[in-house]
Image (cartoon, rainbow, N blue to C red):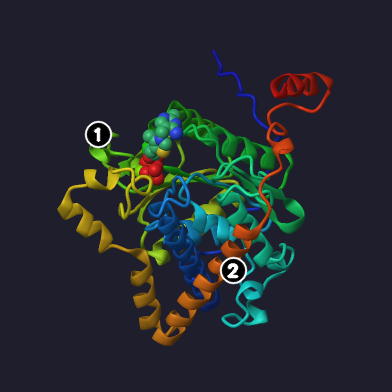
């Protein structure tokens, strides 16, 4: 019997491009370097607050920066981003116009039309700081104090779908966004991130299979930091590389050293090109060092054998990037010091303003729990009484 055609979105011919991946230019590299440093400065501040009990919990993204920043800087206007808990670098890269945020470091000619549509970067950083400490001006208006939020502002070129806590649950959402891009006949691509532990969830299989069958413009980057909470990769999966799974879904798969910004750029540019030209999804495994525990102070760092801890810490992607950029003549040591100082000033300014900002309004607490309408109002009244 002939096979029945699967239910597919309306046919969409994505313009095939012959463009070859060329290496990153100096403007892209200096931008990536600043954003990686900004992400690190943010983490440093929040790690300190977690250690001194000023916030309850912090999931550090230290070690992931070259992967998250590098991948997100390959996005185009209209592309969508789906993040989980260690993707601060991708968020900063998607939100912030660095030429306006750090005019002492960047010249206006580094800016793009895409950047100029974004909100004032200091305002976005302030809102992000408010989000992280549960203030009213945060994206969830203080309902949540975490990365459990999204920012959909297409007029600014930002389509960021955040996470819910359940690992793997955002994967089908990312694939759904990619399907919508096909159905809307846009050339948008979806960039998603996930930890290697979450790839053991059924949602991973269903998403990648759908992405393969429907040739979705979807790129999933697995941030393989060797541990899921306290579970090492040897107890998580039996294949040698998670990218090998791509073959089973009929999609492209690549495993890269996620601490090498150049490798990230090359792989991701190729993946975006593939997705935009109609050749479907890519599964990227970015191999990363475990540089922190799961959450600050939860004891999970102690689970990592001592010898491995030292090896992971020695693979810090930022000094590696700085060394490469100095060798190429893109940066000098003086500029690196200035970047570190400006990054830390940007974080301090956003955070100190957030600390002075209003507490959440209690009336918003139930706002996102129930759909508007009489029935919801009745439930809310009942809950309050
Ligand atoms: C379905 C589900 N199971 C367990 C958890 C608790 N949990 C939160 S993060 C995490 C570890 C995730 O590991 P991985 O996916 O490798 O990401 P990493 O934290 O290492 O970046 C666990 C077990 C959860 N949020 N959802
Ligand atoms: Mg992990």
Q: Is residue 325 above or below residue 206?
A: below
Q: Which residue is mark 2?
A: 349
Disc 1 C-beta below 8 A from ligand 1:
no
At 51% from the left edge and 67% from the top edge, which residue is drawn?
Answer: 35
Q: In terms of image quarters, where does ligand 1 lie? A: top left
Which is more toward the observer, 132 or 18? Answer: 132
* Alpha carbons under labels 1 and 2: distance apart: 43 Å
In the figure, is residue 109 to the left or right of 43? right
In the figure, is residue 94 to the left or right of 12? left
Q: Residues within 10 Å of mark 1 (few under 14, many from 20)?
A: few
In the figure, is residue 293 to the left or right of 308? right
Which is more toward the observer, 304 or 19? Answer: 304
| The residue positioned farthest toward the left in the image shown | 307
- From the image, which quarter does the N terminus lie in? top right
Residue 261 image offset from top left, x and y in percent:
41, 65
Q: Which residue is mark 1?
A: 235
Residue 277's disc number? none
């Amino acid at each position: 019997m002939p096979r029945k055609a699967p239910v597919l979105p309306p046919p969409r011919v994505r313009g095939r491009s012959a463009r070859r991946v060329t290496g990153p230019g100096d403007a892209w590299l200096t931008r990536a370097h600043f954003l990686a440093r900004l992400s690190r400065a943010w983490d440093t501040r929040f790690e300190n607050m977690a250690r001194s009990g000023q916030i309850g919990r912090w999931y550090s993204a230290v070690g992931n920066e070259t992967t998250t920043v590098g991948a997100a800087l390959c996005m185009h206007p209209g592309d969508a981003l789906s993040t989980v808990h260690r993707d601060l670098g991708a968020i900063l890269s998607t939100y912030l116009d660095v030429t306006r945020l750090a005019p002492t470091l960047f010249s206006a000619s580094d800016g793009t039309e895409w950047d100029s549509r974004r909100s004032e970067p200091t305002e976005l950083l302030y809102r992000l700081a408010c989000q992280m400490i549960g203030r009213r001006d945060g994206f969830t208006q203080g309902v949540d104090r975490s990365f459990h939020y999204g920012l959909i502002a297409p007029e600014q070129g930002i389509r960021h779908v955040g996470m819910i806590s359940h690992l793997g649950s955002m994967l089908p959402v990312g694939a759904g966004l990619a399907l919508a891009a096909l159905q809307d006949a846009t050339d948008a691509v979806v960039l998603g991130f996930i930890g290697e532990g979450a790839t053991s969830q059924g949602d991973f299989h269903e998403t990648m299979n759908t992405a393969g069958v429907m040739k979705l413009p979807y790129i999933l980057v697995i941030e393989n930091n060797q541990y899921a909470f306290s579970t090492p990769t040897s107890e998580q999966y039996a294949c040698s590389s998670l990218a090998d799974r791509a073959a089973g879904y009929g999609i492209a798969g690549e495993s890269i050293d996620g601490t090498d910004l150049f490798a990230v750029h090359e792989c991701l540019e190729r993946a975006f090109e593939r997705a935009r030209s109609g050749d479907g999804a890519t599964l990227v495994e970015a191999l990363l060092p475990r540089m922190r525990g799961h959450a600050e102070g939860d004891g999970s760092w102690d689970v990592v054998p001592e010898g491995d801890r030292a090896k992971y810490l020695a693979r810090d992607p930022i000094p590696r990037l700085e060394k490469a950029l100095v060798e190429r003549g893109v940066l000098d040591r003086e500029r690196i010091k200035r970047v570190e100082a400006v990054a830390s000033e940007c974080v301090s300014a956003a955070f100190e303003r957030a600390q002075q900002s209003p507490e959440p309004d209690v009336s918003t607490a139930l706002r996102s729990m129930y759909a508007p309408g009489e029935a919801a109002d009745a439930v809310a009244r009942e809950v309050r009484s």
